[in-house]
Amino acid sequence: MSKKVSKEGQKKSFSTVRNDSQLMQQRYVQNYQKHKDKPLLVLLGFYKGQYHKFVISSIFYLIKHSPALFSSLLIANVINGVIAGGDYARESIYINVGIWLLLLLVHLPANYLHSKYRSRVTRETEAGLRSALVLKLQELSIPYHTQTQSGRLQSKIIRDVEAIETLSSQLFINILNIVMNLVIMIGVTAVKNRIILVFFVLVAPIASITIIVFRRKIGKVNRAFRVEMEETSAKVMEMVEMVPVTRAHALEDVEKRRMSEQMEETAKKGYYLDMVQSNFGAVGWVVFQVFQAFCLAFSAYLALKGKILVGDITFYQTSFTTVVNQFTALINLLPIITKGLESVSSVGEVLSCDDVERNEGKEILTELKGEYEFRHVGYSYPGSDEDVLEDIYMKVPQGKTIAIVGESGAGKSTVLNLLIGFMMPKNGTLFVDGKDISTINLKSYRRFLSVVPQMPLLFTGTLRDNITYGMEDISEEQIYAAIEAANLKNMVDRLPDGIDSVIEEHGANLSGGQRQRIAIARALIRDPKVIILDEATSALDVVSEREIQDALGRLVKGRTTFIVAHRLSTVKNADWIAVLDKGRIIEEGTYADLMEKKGAFYHMESLQISVS
């Protein structure tokens, strides 16, 4: 009973997290669209509803830093008291040292509370932003994913969000510290001596001019470096995936040279960025140090003339050093701010991308018979005038097996993508159970489908996890029935931990046929109404293929099945075969009919028989 309650609690927790991610995503998108050209406002929007936590954190930050803020004033008071001598000296020492010790006493609890509130806000927002990005990537269309390198998307989720978190920490800690120091030091100086205040005030315009001169240059160089880093991330992922091919063809040196060139280009852009930032910081530092030297000379001169106390030289010099350091810190923050704001724009582009599958308001399917009709369907890829499919007309009754064959590039995969709903017809209409597929909630529709892709996709985890991916409350009997049907039993029996044996990344410790059969088991365990097999037996040996075909022959009964195959021998038992050529159906019929016609299908089959 406790296990059941725990599981229900987990489901509720996960559901809550997902709903929170959806709300965050909507809020982030609205915020980005509203302030697209003002990334700083976009950044502030990420923290909407949590500003009060930053206020609380700021209060404790002020308390935490009070010993450092007031130390120069307390030291100056002690020096002036000692010079004055007598009872005033002792009183000055006791009071000022006592205040200093009291301030030190509250430092530790204030530091804890400041860190607690600040870290909680930034880390929760960081996690929320990544969750919103992941959710968005799940919503973006399949064409978007095929056109965008996965390495670039990974860079946005990891590197850009990390840059945003760093920027947030800098803004809400360093900026707070800078403002706090400037206000207190300039305020106390204004009360004690307005002549010295002139030096303090002159620093601001000098800092502003320095920032204006360098800001645009740093922004441009940082943007180029970010794009180059995304390119590097994408190429590294490609390289890792291509290692078996590279090694098999002895192309290690070629790949090393290609990646070395990419790394060198990234290093060049990084070096250029470093030099611009370094020069920026050096110029600002020299200018401020010149002002600091003048301040020391001027305050010493005033002490010689008796206009200020000797101890005040320490205070003014320390105060001016603090002011200079704050402006220097502000200048040094500019590269971090520029990088972070660039990442804000980068992340915002993904969150606000409109290339998504929209299911809101569409009919939710509670059942699926599996009747299909292609009524003069045509398709062309975005930005292309060339038709991939043209005037496809085909009726598929419930429970029938339809095979789609043709040469590479004939349009077979496009037909399957239309059936799954990854793409929508550009011309004509695809009907599912008499309903236009564009009016159907595709999420509800796909619950009745099982797809076995040409390249089986496995993840690191147990065999059980890979077969039952996304499913709950599956019995051992169901799992083993799928294993039996997919001809996996012998393999499972040989594994050290059976179905709980761990599969390596992409199924590296399995053969191609084994990976394909796991994908088939994953599809079969869902008890689908419609099965889509895209070269599902292409990686199997002849014996295994025959066994799988026998199993599928039993399991497809009562289910509508679409098969794409290059091996024409695998479609002999199909109820109907459509032959595609350059996006058009040029022949259709049963296997016997097409062989008797001695047309395109007959010639393809004859060629395969002669080759084999």
Image (tube, rainbow, N blue to C red):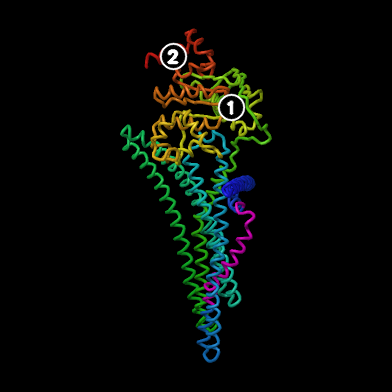
Q: Is residue 321 visible?
A: yes
> Is 169 on the left or on the right of 358, as rendered?
left
Give the labeled residue for mark 2.
605
Q: Residues within 10 Å of mark 1 (few under 14, many from 20)?
A: many
Secondary structure, mark 1, is loop
Q: Nearer the viewer, residue 257 or 127?
A: 127
Residue 529 has which mark? 1
The image shows residue 217, relative to residue 259, as above or below, that is: below
Q: Specify whether 151 is left or right of 367.
A: left
**Numbered disc in front, either 2 or 1:** 1
Q: Which residues are magenta?
A: 45-73
Amino acid at circle 2: Glu
Q: Is residue 578 magenta?
A: no
Using the rendered view, name the quadrant where residue 33 is placed.
Answer: top right
Image coordinates of residue 401 in percent, x first then y, are 54, 20
Residue 382 in which image quadrant: top right
Query: Mark 2 to mark 1: distance in Å?
Result: 30 Å
Outermost residue toward the front? 1
Residue at 55%, 87% in the rendered image:
91
- Which quadrant: the C terminus? top left
Q: Which mark sits nearer the N-terminus, 2 or 1?
A: 1
Residues 395 and 12: in front is: 12
Query: In front: 295, or 176?
Result: 176
Q: Is 239 drawn above or below residue 284 in the view shown?
A: above
Q: In this orientation, does residue 387 appear? A: no
Q: Is residue 31 above or below residue 426?
A: below
Q: Nearer the viewer, residue 124 or 560?
A: 560
